[in-house]
Image (cartoon, coloured by chain):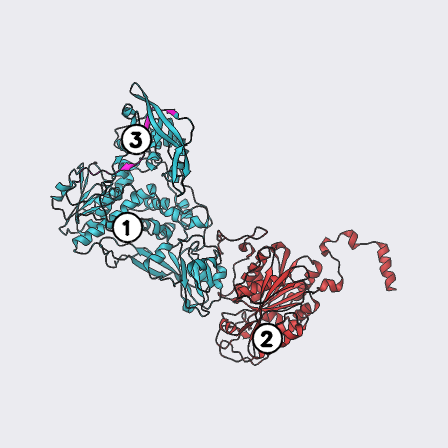
Chain colours: A cyan, B red
Amino acid sequence: MKPTDISAPDYFHKVVDCQWACPAHTPVPEYIRLIAEGRYSDAYMINWRSNVFPGILGRTCDRPCEPACRRGRVEETPVAICRLKRVAADFKDDVKHRMPRPSAKNGKRIAIVGGGPASLTVARDLAPLGYHCTVFDSDPKAGGMMRTQIPKFRLPDSVIDEETDYILNLGIEFKAGQRIDSLKKLLGENYDAIFVGSGAPRGRELEIPGRQEAAANIHIGIEWLASISFGHIDKIGKRVIVLGGGNTAMDCCRTARRLGGKDVKVIVRSGFEEMKASPWEKEDAIHEDIPILNFMVPVAFTHENGRLTGVTFQKVKAEYDSNGRRNLVPSGEPDQTIACDDVLVAVGQENAFPWIERDCGVEFDKWNMPKVDPKTMGSTNPKVFFGGDAAFGPKNIIWAVAHGHDAALSIHKLLSGEDITERPLPEVQVSSQKMGIHEWSYDNDISADKRYKVPHRDKVVALKDIRAEVELGYDVKLALGEARRCLNCDIQTVFAAPLCIECDACVDICPMDCITFTPNGEEADLRQRLKAPSPHLDQDLYVADGLKTGRVMVKDEDVCLHCGLCAERCPTGAWDMQKYLIDMTHAGTSCPSKSRSAA
Amino acid sequence: MTYIAKPKFHHPGLPKNDLGFTRRDYEGKISTLCAGCGHDSITASIIEACFELSIAPHRVAKISGIGCSSKTPDYFLGNSHGFNSVHGRMPSVLTGANLANRDLIYLGVSGDGDSASIGFGQFAHSIRRGVNMTYVVENNGVYGLTKGQFSATADRGSKNKRGLMNTDNAIDLVAMALQLGASFVARSFSGDKTQLVPLIAAAIQHKGAAFIDVISPCVAFNNHAGSTKSFDYVREHNDAVNRLDVITVRDPITVDYAPGTVQVVEQHDGTRLALRKIDADYDAHDRVAAMTFLQRHAAKGQIVTGLLYVDPESEDLHAHLDTVDAPLNRLDEKALCPGSAALDKINASLR
């Protein structure tokens, strides 16, 4: 194998599995260390810079970081990264003075359609640079789906207000209650750039017999949730069926329980395991006495005298064809009709752009989605950018934020007369963490603690009040315990072959058998000759040559605890523990910034 | 010295032996030796050998004297019996323990100071008597704990860290062990675990006095140019005569060397060693030839390593003394007090 080029920003970035998996590339270990130190405000600001909505995401994020977390490969469960983010938001001091100041305007005007996470990210990135940002939203308050679709018992209004205010206070013009119904008209208003972050506002229909006749008691999930959010709906029948297996379905069923639903069921087509909902959201639903029935396909709504009486299901089973594709085929069992008073349909969301005229330079593909460059977020109209669910269909908040950053960078480059396809490399800082003999700047005494549970409000109390937040968040003590579970994967093991005397001290001490000295070979061959099995091919091997015996040092990054014992037991300093901080390029940081990290 | 404990987490794919233990279960406390010490590699090799042989840790007694080397039993086999004895007295304590309980596996760990200076006589007599043990000398040619004076195994003409020349002749413990009748004699290098681990495993299985001299560079005081016990010097002058595989119930320990002639040596207890010859002329069953070979190569500045001599028909001290089969702690009152008739018989024989 070729020696690893550790100067390539991506190499060590990939080792920080959580940060690599996060669409916004939040420096997770860095803020977790700050939480452990009790520096909640600093931890919050690191998050705020990367993901804009730490308090909101700390309650609602889809957490792509957690399945990626190295700890999950070392023991059973990953670090509760998401809930630690909430800790930073819960315990921080007043951070208003740390926010960017509204700056002198540069005379350029940006129109932003929709007030959700992608749009607000664009506004936040651009306003401090002097752009005049105008955000249009049909709702009275900013937040988009974060405010309308996520139930208050998961995300209180106060959290949304606080974090949307940080952005709106940057001198952003928020046009509440103004729905944009013509892109052409907007283009005519001579904005320098337009960002479309209007979401995926339409809930998918379920056109099966009885839909029209029983319409009064059949509700589209996201619309129903929004109506509750606005206070238009405050009750539901006793027996409720929720159709669909995503996170919206989970929000629907739990909301139904709080509005009078006694017998609430979730019924999904697929198997329980394949459901789109996050495992923890399914757990929370089950905890609230909501059964999830699987392999049942709705075929008809039954009704009497124009009133819904139930839903008929066909029973199916999963069969896999020779390509491993799953097909749901009838199991042969008789159809089953389940009686109910109301049905909530949460079978997906769709994009809708009736307000974008097809002749204003924005091209659409055959699925009626705008053609968007995933790198620049630009459309075929050079002035119009997309992000969030509006760009590539329904995803989640953290993806919307990532899109917002990318779009803001493009807009800034466009309006600075630069080529938007040239994306500046992230800024990387690497610094040794050695403080003295046997002294390191981070806590390398690996905690063996299991994942701490987040305390929940008592179920009886929680189900009575739709606004009572169910999760109470970690207290300081639990947060410290959980923070100590982080393996500090950003403190990298850096090897200097010229210093190595091949004494094997690192090989002998490594608790995870990560290090091997062996003759070089091709990767597949090398993986066979390592000191411990190497089953995760997506985890890189760190190869260094230039040793006296002609062998190479191979380190399997897979389950390294970053405990630093290799460096601790190295007599010559050939191993060093170096903190690797990567700052993704945002608008305005196209050349190395002077921003300092917290540590 | 490292202050943090080695994390208990281990690689999820770590293999288990017949007893269900991983290699990590054979570890002891974290080493307090200098970072990079060759002794730590020997520790790791002992751990690996015991793991491969599926040895129950509580069946091992590890006994040592004084010195850096003699500290190491604290770093392996944390669940075994241990005795850290007086300087140079490991062989006597081990002999006594072995006579009292012949069922345990005896691992004597010593250094060049402990065995070639203060305990030289003790070393000689335990070998001479054929005590059933594995006697490992962690040989760095220097007194590390007292900051780097030449030890008795330092080669004449080698230099210390300050550049002073050693003018005394060196004791070659391997030559001594051969001469004193050890039935298993090997030399190895802490920086070559593929050679060392099978040698330790074979020595543990050997019945009789098994002696292994392991050259173990002292990173703090004896790893400079001019030293003959440095990593670089040993790597350059290492003349391995053979490679060993121990054939165990578990997969044989595999070594990644080019295949040569393989000779299977069956030992007294039925265990088998697969000996791959590297030097075609070398015969590991010829004690006299081994001694000559060793000295001829030593004169050329070469360090001969490998299994240098093994006697498959070896016997141990218990056989020589015709002792009782059971360990003393398992003899009951009836066996220990056979009655007045037996006493009369003994008395009669002495009249």
Q: How many marks?
A: 3
| Chain containing the residue with disc 3 | A
Q: Nearer the viewer, mark 2 or mark 3?
A: 3
Distance between mark 3 and mark 1 Cα atoms: 41 Å
Q: Position of residue A360 (x, y in %)?
A: 14, 43
Q: Position of residue B83 (x, y in %)?
A: 62, 60
The residue under label 1 is A49
| Chain containing the residue with disc 2 | B
Left or right: residue A556 compared with residue B295: left
- Point out the image quarter for the C terminus of chain A: bottom left
Residue A389 visible in the displayed image? yes
Where is A489 relative to A161, above or below? below
Magenta region, residue range: A337-356
Where is B205 relative to A303, above or below? below
> Which element is circle 2 on?
loop
- Amino acid identity at mark 1: Arg
Q: Residue at x 43, y 52 (%)?
A: A536
Distance between mark 2 and mark 3 Cα atoms: 90 Å
- Amino acid identity at mark 2: Ala
- As drawn, the label of residue A206 is 3
- Amino acid identity at mark 3: Leu
The residue under label 2 is B152
Distance between mark 2 and mark 1 Cα atoms: 65 Å
Q: Position of residue B290 (x, y in %)?
A: 63, 73
> Which element is circle 3 on?
loop
Mark 2 touching mark 3, by CB under 8 A?
A: no
Q: Nearer the viewer, mark 3 or mark 1?
A: 3
Q: Which corner quadrant of the image does residue A394 belong to?
A: top left
| Chain containing the residue with disc 1 | A
